[in-house]
Amino acid sequence: MFHSLEHIRNKSRAERQTIAFSIAGGITGVVFLLWAVSFLASLEQESITPSTVDEPTHFSSFVGSLQDASVILQEQARALREGIQAVTEGEQSADQLPQPDVTEAPVAASEEDARPQGEMTDSGLEIIQVER
């Protein structure tokens, strides 16, 4: 074997490439033949075994899982709509509650006691602007 490799090494680059291509093609051909034989055998085996109607195919299983996911999404969308409706109804009923009386804070006697006074919003939050 080593003698054959040494003999190939002594040949020109074009001849070595031709030999390498031939060997690679031969190996690829053998792998293809093995695959073709096993593929044909599996086809013959499938034609021998009777197919049952009850057994679902891969595609029908896929379609069934898509339908299940569609049902789940529809249920989630309905629950989301109901939640949004409950929140908006809650806001409407909160608007009908009596609002607390907001009075202005007393003015500080001196500048040192003064803290920044802000503006009250409808929700009862005070907005304070700070100058630098």
Image: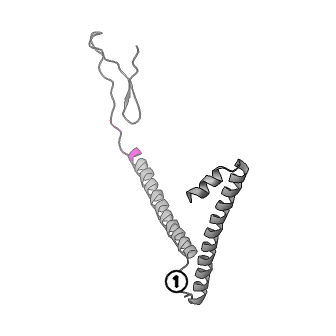
What is the magenta segment's predominant secondary structure?
A: loop
In the rendered image, the vertical position of residue 1 relative to residue 113, given as above or below: below
Q: Looking at the image, which is closer to me, 46 or 99?
A: 46
In the visual, does 4 lie left or right of 15? Answer: left
In the visual, does 18 lie left or right of 116? Answer: right
Coloration of the structure image: one colour
Determine the residue positioned at 36% across, 34% down.
124
The number of numbered discs placed on residues in the rendered structure image is 1
Q: Say which element carries label 1.
A: loop
In the rendered image, the vertical position of residue 19 relative to residue 113, given as above or below: below
Residue 129 pos. (x, y %):
41, 21
Determine the residue positioned at 56% across, 56% down.
2
Magenta segment: 94-101
Determine the residue positioned at 59% across, 77% down.
38
In the visual, does 97 lie left or right of 7? Answer: left
Quarter of the figure that contains the C terminus = top left
Determine the residue positioned at 59% across, 81% down.
41
Q: Which picture quadrant has residue 102?
A: top left
Please name the amino acid that badge 1 sits on.
Glu
Quarter of the figure that contains the N terminus = bottom right
Identify the residue position indicated by label 1 in the image: 55
In the rendered image, the vertical position of residue 113 relative to residue 7, given as above or below: above
Q: Looking at the image, which is closer to me, 1 or 89?
A: 1
Crowd band around label 1 with a 10 angstrom C-alpha radius: few (<14), some (14–19), many (20+): few
Residue 25 pos. (x, y %):
67, 62
In the rendered image, the vertical position of residue 87 relative to residue 38, given as above or below: above
Residue 83 pos. (x, y %):
43, 56
